[in-house]
Amino acid sequence: MISAEGRKPADPGGDAGVSPREEALWLFESMVPGTPVNNLSVALAVAGRLDPLRLDAALGAVLRRHAALRTVYRGEGARLTKRVVGPGEFRLNLVQVVTVGEPTEADLASVTAVPFALDGGPMLRAVLFRSPDTDVLCVTAHHLVFDEESAPVFLEELASAYEGTRDDADPDADPDADVATDDGAANGAAGPAPSRESLAYWREELAGATTDTMELSCTEPEPDRPTLAAARLDHALRPRTVAGVRRLAADLGVPESAVLLAAYYVLLEASGAGPDLLVGFPVDVRPENADRAIGYHVNHVPLRLRLDRRESVRDLVLRSRERLDAAVAHADVAVDAQADLMPAARSGRRSLPFRHVFEHRNGGGLAAFTLGGLAATPLPAPSGFGKFDLRLRATSTDDAVVLHAVYRTELFEQAHAELLLARFEAVLNSFADDPDRAVAEVERWSERDHEIVGAANDTTRPVEPASVLEAVHAQVLRSPDAVAVVEGGRTVGYRRLWNAAHAVRALLRDAGVGTGDVVAVALPRGPELVAAVLGAWLAGAAYLPVDTAHPEERIRYQLSDSAARVLVATADTVGGLAYVAEDGPLVLAVPPVEQAPEPGTADADAGAGAVTVDPKACAYLMYTSGSTGRPKGTLIDHAALGNAVAHFAEQFGAAAGDTTLWTTTFAFDISGLELFVPMVTGGRLVAAPDQARSDGRLLRELIEEHGARFVQATPTTWRLVIDRVADCLRGRGVIVGGEPVPLSLAQRLVAAGCVLHHAYGPTETTIWSTSRVLVEEPQGRLDVGSPIRNTKVHVVDGHGRDLPVGVRGELCISGVGVAIGYHGRPDLNAQRFGEHPEYGRFYRTGDVACWRADGLIDLFGRSDRQVKLRGNRIELGEIEETLLAHPEVGGAAVIMVGDPSADAVLIGCLEPADGPIDTAGVWAHARARLSRSMLPGDLVTVDAMPLNGSGKVDYPALQRMVEARRKAAVRPGADHRGHADHQGHADHSDRPDRAQCPDLDDLTAELTGLWRTILRDEGLDADADFFASGGNSMLAALAMQEFQNSSGVSISLAEVFERRTPRALAVVAREAARRTGDAAAAG
């Protein structure tokens, strides 16, 4: 909408080469074409009316005076050239825009956020916004011709020229007579060659450094196609903090910038950047006699520091000062312009030697001044983009220090960026309070962090009665004739159920079962199972659920390991468990509940007395799969179970007469919620057959027939049945958990009109430990809510330190729900359970999580479901969720096969939703949403996912199935659905018929040869990813220049970043050659 016009150079032969610093700046911009990432702007609010003619003349005077502002650039293919336009040739038009009111941020953005084309046109623009009361001047320049130190000089000379105090009447006068620049005329010149000493310093300083490990764990993953959109936050340090920083700096004899830099290192390390830190620092490289030169005269040097948690704050500050001084002393090397010095970055998008920048300035920035006698006040004029993940500037004045943070909005939420600034202040206060404390003891939490986490963990609530058994007994006394359990055509009331429980108790006592023993229960869902559980408790024992569908060997192991005294079965199933009696517990057949003593008989009345339970006694023993293949038994006490059941009974709003559908296998701990919530609230429990977990039609019939108010299932089950049951869920409570819940599934369930209870929790902390009620469709990442009553959640780092909001770490859980431990596994108990001096016993879940700013918890999968592939941290669950969002995909699981250090590849396994899967459509869906590093190397379809006994995906079984299929596959001519390169990256570009394009093989071979030569690796083939093979942006530019020289075909850097392999780029090159040939023929 707004443009600046200037005459382009008439003589292309006048173009000149550029310096390495200029080239590095342009190369970075080439990775994100069409963005104003290199724009710098100054804006002035003028109280009154400016004279446009005088202002235009003043701008011309400044441009004539500074050659840099008259330098134009042309980027063609992989080559950048520049030309300094003479004062008589160059003219910049001042554009005037009339606004109704004061210019808005959008008005300014129409100037500041528009990129420059680098096509030989002007590298700056000027717009005068005219409102009724105020004029606003906005001048935007490309960083190639302007830097932040240029701004005050530009404004001072503009004001002077506007007021007519500078004589610029003679256009033939030497425009640079009193302004020295790097070379006396041109901007960004290379200047003297870097010293050998400096090159050697940086080569040693950056040896082994990588930016891959510098990603903050409080950020979102780097997108494959970043926009570099950014926002700015300001934060004034409190007077107490400022005084402490200056006192510490004075005590140590260092500038306050050293204290601030040291605190920045600690902030980054505490945010997940690791101990080996690289921070960028801008250095003004103007020669001594060119302090008033306008142009690109800044060099960002990397400050590398390996943080030692044992050293004192005092020593850290002194080391930070030393690193800063050494780097500045060797700032004659532009590290980002030296390919052999660049730290390794396997992603390819990372062409800078650092992700985070620190700056310190003395003075309050641009000051107010007068322009033609009118007050002119500088305004913020950001471009809305930033090349660094986080850039922190501290501006010091006599009585204040103000922080200015520019953060990439693709990586940070605003709330987390605000918390980072607050934490930075907390670190500074901790520094000043005790400079002799170890770095490990420095406070890393802000007051707001403590408020958020403290409020979420404020969960202490009374639970009366403390045990489920006591609560059921109270319910029996309140409504003995109410229906308790429905199974098939049978209906059992609370009194009869209680009497049956006492009958089981008597059987168990006769069999020698006593307090502390284990009773195995191998019964189908129904009233006999409920009576057996209650009877075991009445006998003082714990129950062990046994799924008779499990293999005989697994059942034998559980019975042996648990030392179960008795196994309870039905008369119909005892025969099938005969093998147990050989060397296992006594097998007892319990009679149907209908045979329990009738009310009023002596046997029945014997069960009417008071019930007492030791809350710390074991309530049940639950076996889950172990990582070594040996199942581990978790012991849960009565207080833990009672707490979970009481919480969810309240959360569900469960009341007497409400019906709950009992669908989950009894050997899965979440089944306990379906069983016990209705029992303690006077509800009705309807036992569903196993088929209901996969037969949506049957599940729907059960829901409607019994008027079920609550239905629980795993995400896998819900995905199987949702099509059949969605329109009968309105108003019902739906509970989902047990494995990661895809956002698309949660949205569909909520859209069906249900009240969705999204729950999370490992077996070791009793069924569910966190939950969230959803009545509106969730957007973005699906959180798992907040801790349930009497439960606390902690996110900790590798040293066990609690992490603040937004920083990812291992999720630990403490509180009433924590298990007694693993039965007979002291080794595992020591690994997974711990004692904390503040919050007591806790369990290490192995799940990666972080606190959100709203006090909820985000999960990022298990730490053992995260893989590191070619320098990229990849959460397999995120890929699965993306694949599941495709409508044709009913189930998705991602596994990694091969050696992670060599030929590993990600495989996406797809289960059809209803009918065949269009894998090309799934690829297009995935490529539009996932970064390249996360794309599976292949997609395979399976008729049905293998499931374990808990109804979850059996990943080991899936791994074996896929590896067997890959070994059996005939590679020559195989149909891969999507083909993977040797790096495991899928390339699904449409490849043309080679018969129609005979030059494609030649182009591919030439590009492959270039890859081998420039990357010095003769083993690279046509599918080698340039960046995963050790390339970076500078080497890519060199490769494309060599290719253009030899073939006459130009490929842009953006295409290299997008296509990356010789085979894919050959297609691009062929099309470019065809366009060139067509144009030549037309001419």
Image (spheres, rainbow, N blue to C red):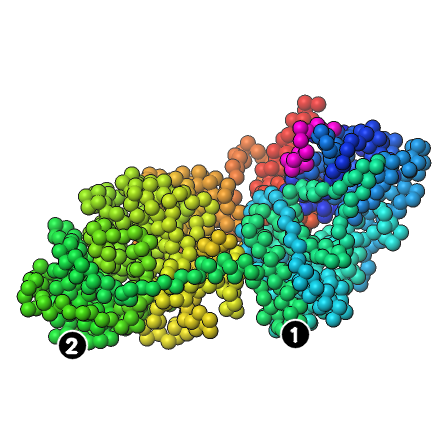
Left/right placement of residue 48 relative to residue 544 reads: right
Where the N terminus falls, by quadrant? top right
Taking depth in this image into account, of 704 and 445 the one nearest to the observer is 445
Q: Amino acid at mark 2?
A: Gly
The quadrant of the rendering that contains the C terminus is top right
Magenta stretch encompasses residue 101 = yes
Q: Is residue 34 left or right of residue 700?
A: right
Residue 854: x, y in percent? 48, 52
Task: Give the CA separation, mark 1 to mark 2.
Answer: 64 Å
- The reply to whether residue 477 is visible in this rendering is yes
What number is the disc on residue 857? none
Magenta segment range? 96-109
Per the image, label 1 sits on a secondary structure element best described as loop
Q: Residue at x 52, y 34 (%)?
A: 993
Which residue is disc 2 drawn over?
512
- Looking at the rendered structure, the secondary structure element under dot 2 is loop
Image marks 1 and 2: residues in contact by CB distance under 8 Å? no
Percent across and percent down for residue 708 are 23, 47
Residue 950 makes an appearance in the image: no
- Whether the magenta-drawn stretch holds residue 418 is answered as no
Front-most of residues 94 and 889: 94
Which residue shows up at 35% across the image and 59% down it? 768
Task: Please provide percent x and percent y for residue 200.
Answer: 76, 63
Q: Which residue is mark 1?
A: 436
Residue drawn at x 52%, y 37% is 991
The 10 Å Cα crowd at callout 1, few under 14, some 14 to 19, many 20 or more, is few
Q: Amino acid at mark 1?
A: Asp
